[in-house]
Image: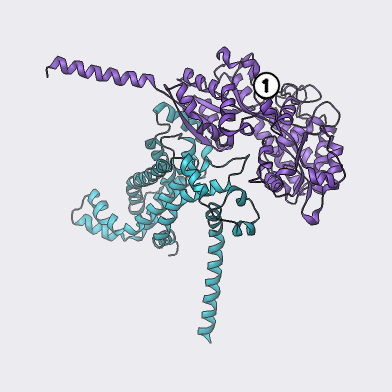
Amino acid sequence: MARKSSSLKTSVVTVAAWTIGFLIFFPILWIIILSFKTEGDAIKAPLEVLTSGWTLHSYAEVQERSNYALHFWNSVVLSVGSTLLALVIAVPAAWAMAFVPGKRTKDLLMWMLSTKMMPAVGVLVPMYLLFRDLGLLDSRAGLTVVLTLINLPIVIWMLYTYFKEIPGEILEAARMDGATLRSEILYILTPMAVPGIASTMLLNIILAWNEAFWTLQLTTKAAAPLTQFIASYSSPEGLFYAKLSAASTMAIAPILILGWFSQKQLVRGLTFGAVK
Amino acid sequence: MTMTYRAMLGATVALTLASAALAETTITVATVNNGDMIRMQGLMDDFNAKHPDIKVEWVTLEENILRQKVTTDIATKGGQFDVMTIGTYEAPIWGKQGWLVSLNDLPAEYDVDDLLPAIRGGLTVDGNLVAAPFYGESSMVMYRTDLMEKAGLTMPEAPTWAFIKDAAAKMTDKDAEIYGICLRGKAGWGENMAFLTAMSNSFGAKWFDADWKPQFDQQPWKDTLNFYLDLMTNYGPPGASNNGFNENLALFQQGKCGMWIDATVAASFVTNPKESTVADKVGFALAPDNGLGKRGNWLWAWNLGIPAGSQKVDAAKAFVAWATSKEYLALVAEKEGWANVPPGTRTSLYENPEYQKVPFAKMTLDSINAADPTKPTVDPVPYVGVQFVAIPEFQGLGTMVGQLFSAALAGSSTADDALAQAQAAVTTEMTRAGYIK
């Protein structure tokens, strides 16, 4: 009897989970469907959209008008570059906070997180002036630094929760054996925290890939990533759903595939340390 | 090879490279994503043939993103763009700030006197032409000729608001999902407020009096808003408070609107048989009035301006002159047909017998000529702009008031409440900004 009710419970939960999952995924699915329609069909009522013909026309037009390869490459460089740079800063920072906490470590962590709460547009003009004077406007280097900085609090927080799970005694033992600080972090701590670092990296790559304020404001052509590629297909006057959907599908496809293959690590990474 | 010979060879190579670099100037053009601008990008061979020394690179963006980006760049003299596509809203404000290069010295063959006076007036600051119009539009009534006939009515060329209401009532057939009138309801200074501000002009309303005091507590604004709400609640489509240009375009093309008052550019979409199910049943008329001497139509143009921070002003001017010239219009006509020529900028286009055959050409010109951005309202006002007020604060104010009016359309507040809140909020902002002493 008990088994029966628990299997019923399982199937209810499964159905609910699939339903919620489908609801969340539905907008993306709809974008993919619209991308294979003509502009005229794309604005029809939902049922008519499904029954109308399929075409690759929007993809052809997007290919013709934009340099997808350049935008894609910029997105890759920016997201991977900023993630690696963030790790270089965050690993030592998280080590210090996890293993040699000071009186104000908690406050420091909260303060770092609070910087994420300020609307980005508030510092747009100062940032733009800095970039102008340093000659960094429309450069991948400048934008990599910005993306690093805006995601740094999250990276440090995630790594901090991972490092907290690692017994400090192991590091202490390494020190007893004469390991320097550098080798302690590089050869003892990092290998043990690889799953945590990997999921932090993945999340940060996704965040940097999707970042659509600074990447739009600080680039024009040379360093413009996929966010600008999408932004060039929307229009207040005129039909654009099909072309915009095609551009969006092309922009999210790489990260969707990456996310699909790494979802186990991602979910683990996000929930790790949440329940203790 | 002797040292001298090598050095000479090296110097020659360096010189050749340097002169090649000097010869080619690359300019960056920031532009909105609309059909006319995209078409121009496909016609660049003509410009390249005439100016082999100038290379043009395009940055195409959605209107609101573009506006934010070019505003940041020009205000900080970032120098990312050599030519910017700007609206008639920005041109006078930026011109006054000295942010735009004067175009008064364009060559004689450019024929600046050929530009439509209404459009040119909105782009002139202290006698300087600060941007060149690429494409101009107004708003007008588009209506279904078959439904009008069925209702037993004939649309006059210049209808009144009373006629529009009567026609909307007779055309509405909610069971068949046909709504007498479709109008903008989505909140935004360029969405519902573009329509409502232009409409209010024909009711004798205005945003501010001569002392910059907001006028939402006056009778003309009450009349405007009540008329609009009455029209839309009784004869408009459901959920109209979410409808902007594109939503109404879709409704009209699917045959669900009897009338639609919106941008003249829509004419080419609704009459296009590839997109529209009612392509052969559309008529046009001037935007309505109330007999007060002003019609409820707006005036907008996309213009090319050169930011004062640009290092390549000469090349940029050559491009602007080409893109807004008579020759460019002829080029589009030759390659893509007269219906695709960017409208609303030059008198000579409307005098062209070929162009006069385009069904909506005359109505577009008449609509543009019926709007005067320097004298937009029945009573004199201290500002320029038909469907906007050309002050930097207007984007914020317009969107705020637009949200209040959109909420009234959605039924979550009344017209009186919306107007009272608009009056209070705009008064506060204008006092803070120093307009009201």
Residue B254 shown left or right of residue B215 in the figure: left
Looking at the picture, the colour scheme in use is: by chain
Amino acid type at image mark 1:
Thr
Which residue: 76% across, 39% down?
Answer: B283
Image vertical order of residue B262 relative to residue B208, above or below: below
Q: Which residue is mark 1?
A: B347
Residue B193 shown left or right of residue B203 in the figure: left
- In the picture, one chain is purple; tell me its letter: B
Residue A245: percent from left, percent from top: 53, 49
Which of the 4 image quadrants contains residue B330? Answer: top right
Q: Mark 1 falls on what kind of element?
A: helix
- Colour of the chain lettered A: cyan
Q: Closer to the camera, A22 or A272?
A: A22
Q: Is residue A107 visible?
A: no
Q: Name the image quarter holding the N terminus of chain B.
A: top left
Which of the 4 image quadrants contains residue B126? Answer: top right
Residue B68: percent from left, percent from top: 56, 34
Chain letter of disc 1? B
Q: Closer to the camera, A80 or B109?
A: B109
Q: Closer to the camera, B183 or B148?
A: B148
